[in-house]
Amino acid sequence: MDQPLAGKKIVLGVTGGIAAYKAAVLCSRLVALGAEVRVIMTEGATKFITPLTMQTLSHQPVVTDVFDEPDASSIRHIAWADWADLVVVAPATANLIGKYAAGIADDMLTTTLLATTAPVLVAPAMNVHMLEHPAVVRNMEILAERGVAFVEPGTGQLACGYVGKGRLAEPDDIAEAVVRMLAGDRPLAGRRVLVTAGGTVERIDPVRYLTNDSSGKMGFALAEAARFMGAEVTLVCGRTEGKPPAGVTVIRAESAEEMHEAVMERLPYADFVAKAAAVADYRPAARARSKMKKDAERLTLELVRNPDILQAVGEWTASRRAAGEPAPYVIGFAAETGDLERHAMEKIRRKKCDLIVANDVSAAGAGFGADTNIVSIYDARGLVEALPMMSKRAVAERIWRLAAGRAAAMRGDGDA
Ligand code: CTP
């Protein structure tokens, strides 16, 4: 069997939630993938599954008590913290997340978490209302800002009877995140990535504007996936919903003109550009300085064309390449409501980008505001890949893998 985790040392922390039983499956997966796993259980975890289960699966002694020090020559929580290449906490309760964010160390797991300098991956599992509680949300933000990685909980039937988000991610998904973190699968390492996200805002007067339904989720997913794959990411955001991913540089740009300026300024430093923003094609010809009054029965708003940012990026890139200069690999998006292929091919030619990611925004499970997307990816010759409905994060990863491989081939780095 393929063992991408051979030689890797993982501390698996298990806390006291009903999902603790899934930690047993995760433990055996990690061992099967080649990892050496040492398990720490909180007292709460031992109410759900026994240390003997985890000891049998990990083939290692399990620690539950920070004061249980059988070896006088070493202090166990420090030794384990130093030993680990990665610490995984699955499931992580609200209590564990709160203590970790506050720097509390009152048991073996929390002391190890504070003592380790290894990367940490947290897989939360709790009731949907607990997950959405501002205290828990803030604690997770604090940890993410400190570089802790998360595996998103799933949505479905919860043990408490509620249906909602909060279920521990599947052991296979957690194991996959571990492999990504440890197995050096970072095709964008050392690359600079520029992503745009969200809808632009075109002001009519100080309180009114034209915008669109874009939530920014696809752009956020692209930024997060690129960072995860090793890139240094700049995210130029219009109007977006939710918080941008941690660990990326966020630049706010309200209008298409502002976004145009922000992108063109940073273009010479980018290795990849992904233009997921929904840029308004038109803006009001004039912007009223004070709030407009309703004097007339009819009002005609005159609009003028905005710059096409992707086209400007594509043209700049094409001229650099023609001159033999390095230029970024450019990924555009096409939001359509029908005739996907024809529109996508027309856009890739007109805007001179390397790839166009097209989606039918009128389809269920695709487009604005959704967490999933159904996309087809085209290059100048035609369809490259038609993806099934996938999370925007998974779509983002596929796009980057494709782009990283193609850009490497273009640079002559072989099949990187
Ligand atoms: N785009 C851009 N600047 C604009 C309009 C669009 O950079 N003024 C970019 C988008 O970020 C996206 C791509 O162009 O990557 C396609 O956007 P889309 O709205 O689908 O296409 P349009 O060029 O606006 O064409 P149309 O409205 O005719 O479909």
Image: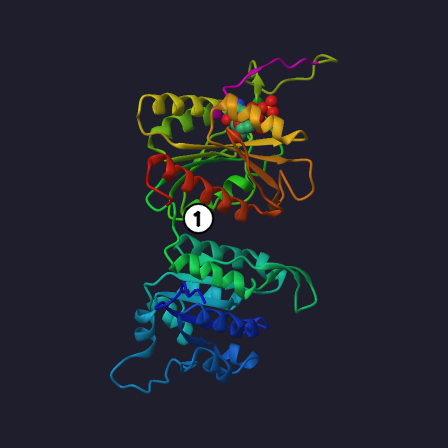
Magenta span covers which residues? Answer: 299-310
Q: Position of residue 301 (x, y in %)?
A: 64, 15
Residue at point 58%, 70% (across, down): 19
20, above or below 219, in the image? below
Q: Nearer the viewer, residue 308 or 354?
A: 354
Amino acid type, callout 1:
Ala
Res. 242 image quadrant: top right
Left or right of 244, for residue 415: left
Q: Is residue 249 visible?
A: no
Q: Is residue 269 magenta?
A: no
Q: Position of residue 280 (x, y in %)?
A: 57, 25
Q: Secondary structure at mark 1?
A: loop
Q: Position of residue 307 (x, y in %)?
A: 50, 19
Point out the image quarter for the C terminus: top left
Figure disc tally: 1
Res. 319 image quadrant: top left
Q: Can you tell me whether the CB of the residue at mark 1 lies under 8 Å from the nearest atom of ligand 1?
A: no
Residue at point 61%, 36% (across, down): 359
Q: Residues within 10 Å of mark 1 (few under 14, many from 20)?
A: many
350, above or below 84, in the image? above
- Colour scheme of the picture: rainbow
Residue at point 62%, 38% (across, down): 368
Point out the image quarter for the N terminus: bottom left
Residue tagged 1? 246
Left or right of 61, for residue 305: right
Q: Is residue 213 visible?
A: yes
Q: Nearer the viewer, residue 336 or 354?
A: 354
In the displayed orientation, state which residue is furthest to the left: 73
Which quadrant contains ligand 1? top right
319, above or below 4, in the image? above
